[in-house]
Image (cartoon, rainbow, N blue to C red):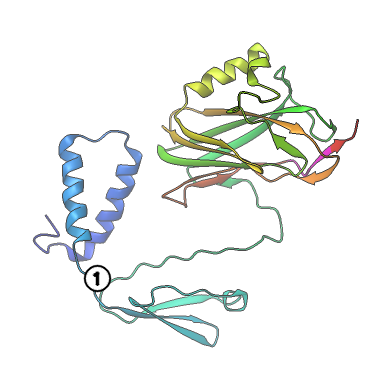
Amino acid sequence: MLEENDLGKDKRDERLFALADEVAANRYLSTQESNSLFMAGRNLLGKAEKDWTASIASGTQTRELSNKQPGLKLDGSLLASPLSVHNQSSDALYQQLTVSGYPAQAPTAGGENLSIRRGYLNLSGAPLNIGALKTGQLVLVHLEIGAKQRVPDALVVDLLPAGLELENQNLAQSAASLEDASEEVKTIRESMENAGIKHQEYRGDRYVAALDIDGSSTVHLLYLARAVTPGTYRVPPPQVESMYRPNWQALGEAPAQMVVKGK
């Protein structure tokens, strides 16, 4: 209604962002609510984009942006100085900055809305010391994921240390199975089966799962890996994020290293 009658122009976008957050936090919408969202989205998407210009400054350098060239790739030297964006148009503009690089230090655990914790177990369900693994030894990885608010599009990514190899549970001829684990582990498996898992993959270097986290309980995930290559390896932290709200993300704690010894 605000859009159709050109009312509350200065507050319209703020209300739109607030509405998006409310929709993401609700599992169910009534037919009327769904229809209202559809109508609002149709009106917004049907609007023609106006011409706009802006400039981005870093140190003594300035680059131009416009609706014809809305993005720029900045190298490290430009990012070393504070960035400022100046809107040269009368309409509001919204900026997005994506940074890609390799951290000089390991990232610290923590996050926003989401949380993730990882543990290493043996097949009996007891904690496993990954500082003294042997080649061929099975490692049961237990992930616990929680959220303060519902996240319907959570993506869990657990990168493997270089000395481990996933046991793909989707393959009938897999050399090891979670079916062989203890009763304690089977209890965690039952909790995993009741979780909102939309998809999971066993890749060459990582375990990936897409989840719907309701915000009131902890999701448990399990997967099997095997120590294959002797050596000392760094251990990446587990991570989870909302696929459509990247500010909702979390990193878990990780041990400094993993040691695999030959038999």
Residue furthest to the top in view is: 183
- Residue 246: image location, x then y, percent: 47, 52
The image shows residue 104 at horizontal and vertical percentages of 71, 61
Q: Residue furthest front?
A: 173
Residue lying furthest left: 5
Q: Give me the residue at 30% from left, 54% from top.
A: 17
Q: Within the magenta stretch, is there residue 173?
A: no
Q: Which residue is mark 1?
A: 49
Q: Is residue 249 left or right of residue 149?
A: right
Left or right: 1 with respect to 55? Answer: left
Among the 4 quarters of the image, the one containing residue 168 = top right
Extent of the magenta region = 255-259
Classify 160 as above or below 170. Answer: below
Q: Amino acid at mark 1?
A: Glu
Is residue 31 shown above or below 233? Answer: above
Q: Circle 1 sits in a helix, a strand or a loop, which is it?
A: loop
Residue 140 x, y percent position in the rendering: 69, 27
Location of residue 254 in the rendering, given as x and y in whole percent from the top left corner? 70, 41
Q: What residue appears at the point 54 percent right and 34 percent down from the top-left corner?
A: 145
Quadrant containing the N terminus in the rendered view:
bottom left
Which quadrant is the C terminus positioned in?
A: top right
> Nearest the camera: 91 or 98?
98
Residue 258 lies in the magenta stretch: yes
Q: Residues within 10 Å of mark 1 (few under 14, many from 20)?
A: few
User: Which residue lies at the image location 32% right of the left edge and 34% below the top edge?
Assistant: 27
Number of labelled discs? 1
Residue 131: name its quadrant.
top right
> Which secondary structure is most common in the magenta stretch?
strand
Identified at 66% across, 26% down, the residue is 174
Near-viewer residue (65 or 20): 65
